Image (cartoon, helix red, strand yellow):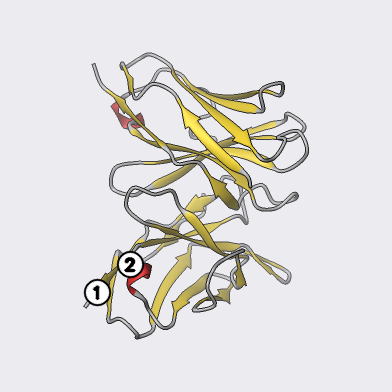
């Protein structure tokens, strides 16, 4: 299975940029498709799809969220961070079955 | 609007079977997409368990293959999870999901609220 590694936590100030990283144990890209997705989960809620295929904003997601990367290294950026963005963020790959998730990065306020 | 809702017992005894139902509204599950079960363990690890496609084909995580079954009732627009021989390691919150893409069944744009299942005697 493809292993996705995320830092457990990131502290950020409101109004600043947050950069959350995800590294895959092998490439999750096929030609021009980067098969990495990002989710946000708040306590007591279900995960919400933010970004699909590395850089595409899901429906209804604010433009302060963006994604980038290819191969094995991917980044979710939130700029500027708002109070409502305090949550845990997960990356997930769909390059190979079974799809796998990173361990999550908890975004905290400084 | 598409909505998914899980239902089922919140407590299951070890060695018994876990059975959950996902009721889908706003979309007919035979019309398209892939319909998955995903679980989140205490401590945040998430695991994709398997899917049933709009045509009824299934695909399971090899780690669960001998214990899992996903089925559907098209008349009720529901799909089901059965996990056999559960242990305390199966304690988790279980989510049903819809795939974002017709062709890629492995990204998920709609999720149910989740149902917490505890395995304990």
* Residue beneath disc 2: A86
The residue at 43%/82% (across/down) is: A79
Residue B89 lies, in percent from the top left, at 32, 31
- The answer to whether dots 2 and 1 both sit on one chain is yes
Tell me the crowding category of disc 1: few under 14, some 14 to 19, or many 20 or more residues within 10 angstroms, Cα based. Answer: some
Q: Is residue B25 left or right of residue A107?
A: right
Image quarter in which the C terminus of chain A is found: bottom left
**Circle 2/circle 1 CB separation < 8 Å:** yes
* Residue beneath disc 1: A109
Q: Quadrant of residue A86?
A: bottom left
Tell me the crowding category of disc 2: few under 14, some 14 to 19, or many 20 or more residues within 10 angstroms, Cα based. Answer: some
Q: Chain of mark 1?
A: A
The residue at 49%/56% (across/down) is: A48
Secondary structure at numbered mark 1? strand
Residue A19 lies, in percent from the top left, at 40, 78
Is B115 situated above or below A66?
Answer: above
Is A28 situated above or below B42?
Answer: below
The residue at 51%/72% (across/down) is: A74
Q: Quadrant of residue B84?
A: top left
Secondary structure at numbered mark 2? loop
């Amino acid at each position: 299975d493809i292993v996705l590694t995320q830092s457990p936590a990131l502290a950020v100030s409101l109004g600043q940029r947050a950069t959350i990283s995800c590294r895959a144990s092998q490439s999750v890209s096929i030609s021009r498709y980067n098969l990495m997705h990002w989710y946000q989960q708040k306590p007591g809620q279900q995960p919400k799809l933010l970004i699909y295929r590395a850089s595409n904003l899901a429906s209804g997601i604010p433009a302060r969220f963006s994604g980038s990367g290819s191969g094995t290294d991917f980044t979710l950026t939130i700029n500027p961070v708002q109070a409502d963005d305090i949550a845990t963020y997960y990356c997930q790959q769909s390059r190979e079955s079974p799809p796998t998730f990173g361990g999550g990065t908890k975004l905290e306020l400084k | 609007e598409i909505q998914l809702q899980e239902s089922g017992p919140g407590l299951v005894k070890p060695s018994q079977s876990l059975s959950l139902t996902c009721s889908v509204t706003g979309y007919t599950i035979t019309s398209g997409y892939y319909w998955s079960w995903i679980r989140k363990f205490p401590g945040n690890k998430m695991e994709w368990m398997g899917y049933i496609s709009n045509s009824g084909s299934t695909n399971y995580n090899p780690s669960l293959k001998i214990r899992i079954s996903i089925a559907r009732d098209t008349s009720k627009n529901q799909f089901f999870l059965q996990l056999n021989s559960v242990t305390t390691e199966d304690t988790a919150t279980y989510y049903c999901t819809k795939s974002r893409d017709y062709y890629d069944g492995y990204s998920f744009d709609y999720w149910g609220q989740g149902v917490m299942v505890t395995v304990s005697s």
